[in-house]
Image (cartoon, rainbow, N blue to C red):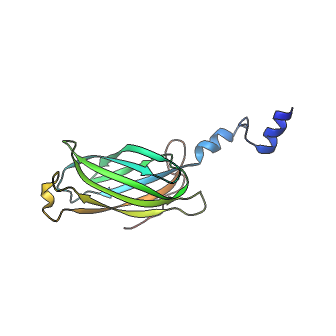
Amino acid sequence: MLLGGSCALLGACGDEPGAEKDAKATQYAIQVHVPLATDPCGVVTATASVMGPVRNIAPVPIEVVDDAIQGAIMDVPVGRQHQVFVKAYTASGLEAYSGVSTVDVNEAGAGFGGASIFMFSRGENCPAGGTEGIRIIGSLESVVVDSSGSPLAPAPQFIP
């Protein structure tokens, strides 16, 4: 009886029909988009990782399709100043580009975070960039997603 009363007061026992669904629906992700239309390095794979104020997320694969690096880092905790690291690789597995930027992940309704990410080529792995190297600019967006990974609301448009 005491346990049942505590659950009712705290709402934390999870026996309610919608409790599990609501917990899964409030997930946050950081979407990554980096155009590669002028990439002479031959990028075929990419990864992204997070070093955050709450926890770190190890590198996860990000797709390279339609001349762009695009994908998301899932299950990012709410917090300010998450450092996002993006790396792009050639078919030989050599790192062609890397970049880092910070983005805030806010609770739903409190606004979303967005940032530009500047990725620079590695001359030894991308000689086509010449002595000056290549800089490509992409974007990071904080979004709320459902349990399937689909955004619950369209991501705000952030133009680097």
Look at the image and tell me in which quarter the C terminus lies: bottom left
Residue 127 % position (x, y): 13, 55
Of residues 34 and 53, the one drawn nearer to the viewer in this rendering: 53
Residue drawn at the location 50% of the way across and 57% of the way down = 154
The foreground one among 54 and 129 is 54
Image quadrant occupied by the N terminus: top right
* Residue lying at 18% horizontally and 62% vertically, measured from the top left: 133
Residue sitting farthest toward the bottom: 160
The spot of residue 18 in percent (x, y) is: 69, 40
Picture coordinates of residue 64, whole percent (x, y) = 30, 48
> Which of 65 and 122 lies nearest the eye of the viewer?
122
Q: Measuring 27% from the left and 62% from the top, which residue is drawn there?
A: 136
Horizontally, residue 13 falls left or right of residue 40, namely: right
Q: Which residue: 26% across, 57% down?
A: 36
Question: Which image quarter: residue 106?
Answer: bottom right
Question: Whole-percent x and y of residue 9?
Answer: 81, 44
